Amino acid sequence: MWTFMLLGLLCASASASAIQARSSSYSGEYGSGRGEPFSHAALQLQGPITAIRVRVDSFNIAGLQVRYGQVWSDYVGGNLGDLEEIFLHPGESVIQVSGSYGNYLKTLNFYTDYGRILSFGKGTGVIFYAVPLDLDAVLRFISGRAGLFVNAIGLHWDTIPETAPATAEPASSVAGPRGGV
């Protein structure tokens, strides 16, 4: 009797693990095999993606930096072009990504669950369109290759853990009329 109960619990546990594992997926790597590899895998523990910085020149995505919770990733890529920065609203997530590439990334478009499109770059190349396999998954972190420009990008999708750190900006320390904040 105890053997059957133990076997049942093991099967249920294995099924739950298999269901949970299916929420994560990977899209990419889009671009060339040149450049040094980078990964923001460890930074997803700081919280969801809350902002994106992209440096663009006339033809390419030159550099990339992503904020996870309140922590910015290391900047990857080169320093040519103009730096553009877009913040996500609290609770907003990236649910799709498209772009184009040649030897380097040309364009990146991040689609959010708030209906916004965060667009960077210009130019044409091979077009890609990436979505998670699980409908409840969001973009959790980015990996890829970079040198003088961003050569390639990989997109890692998963659901947001229920214990994810808060994404709101810290409160101002300016005192109110009664001395409180």
Image: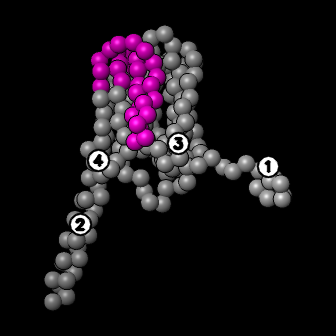
Magenta-drawn stretch contains 111: yes
Tell me the element at label 4: loop
Identify the residue at the far top of this view.
Answer: 58
Q: Which amino acid does label 2 sit on?
A: Ala
Residue 3 position in % (x across, y down): 17, 84
Asked if the residues shown at circle 3 and circle 2 are in contact, with their CB atoms under 8 angstroms apart, the answer is: no
Instruction: Give the mark, 3 or 2, whose residue is nearer the N terminus.
Output: 2
Asked if the residues shown at circle 1 and circle 2 are in contact, with their CB atoms under 8 angstroms apart, the answer is: no
> Label 1: which residue?
174
Residue 84 position in % (x across, y down): 56, 24
In this rendering, the label closer to the viewer, 4 or 2: 4
Q: Which amino acid does label 1 sit on?
A: Val
Q: What residue type is labelled 3?
A: His
> Label 4: which residue?
135
Observer-nearest of 148 and 55: 55
Quarter of the image that includes the N terminus: bottom left
Separation of marks 1 and 2 at Cα, in angstroms: 52 Å
Q: What residue type is labelled 4?
A: Leu
Observer-nearest of 36 and 119: 119
> Label 2: which residue?
14
| Residue 180: quarter of image | bottom right
- Assign the magenta stretch its main secondary structure: strand
Separation of marks 1 and 4 at Cα, in angstroms: 41 Å
